[in-house]
Image (cartoon, grey):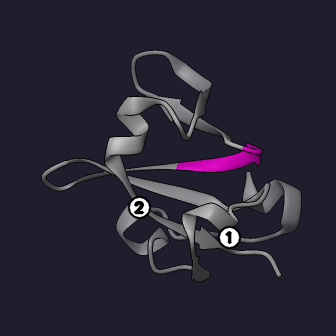
Amino acid sequence: MYYDAFGLKLPRTTKKQALTGSSIAKNKLQAGDMILFKTGWNVRHIGIIITNGKFIHASTSRGVEISSVQNPYWKSKYWQSRRLLP
């Protein structure tokens, strides 16, 4: 998505994507920012903020979906946020 929209090529793995761009505070999220979650011992999940409090992500069981950052599940799994665009 970042490549199609902005010409940005991201690393393939979430481990490397977590080092891309600059770290930002959760309360400073804007459309286009990445939001990262720790969903297991060594499992990471990434979404892209699309609007205030909502992010788009791919679920292995439900496909691409929109979720709320305030959803109790995602709120408890929050790890970090990254900004790729100036």
Q: Amino acid at mark 1?
A: Lys
Label ID, residue 37? none
Task: Specify the segment rendered in magenta.
Answer: 47-52
Compared to residue 60, the image places residue 80 above or below, namely below
Q: Is residue 33 magenta?
A: no
**40 relative to 66 in the view: left or right:** left
Compared to residue 4, the image places residue 6 above or below, namely below
- Furthest toward the left, the residue is 41
- Quick one: label 1 or label 2, which is nearer the N terminus? 1
Q: Nearer the viewer, mark 1 or mark 2?
A: 2
Please name the residue that numbered disc 1 is placed on.
Answer: 9
Q: Residue at x 48, y 62 (%)?
A: 12
Q: Main secondary structure of the magenta part?
A: strand
Mark 2, other Cα within 10 Å: few <14 / some 14–19 / many ≥20: some
Please name the residue that numbered disc 2 is placed on.
Answer: 14
Percent of width and height locating residue 16: 41, 74
Percent of width and height locating residue 2: 74, 59
Percent of width and height locating residue 48: 65, 50
Q: Residue at x 79, y 75 (%)?
A: 85
Compared to residue 8, the image places residue 53 above or below, namely above
Image quadrant occupied by the C terminus: bottom right
Q: Residue at x 54, y 21 (%)?
A: 63
Percent of width and height locating residue 47: 56, 47
Mark 1, other Cα within 10 Å: few <14 / some 14–19 / many ≥20: few
- Quadrant position of residue 66: top right
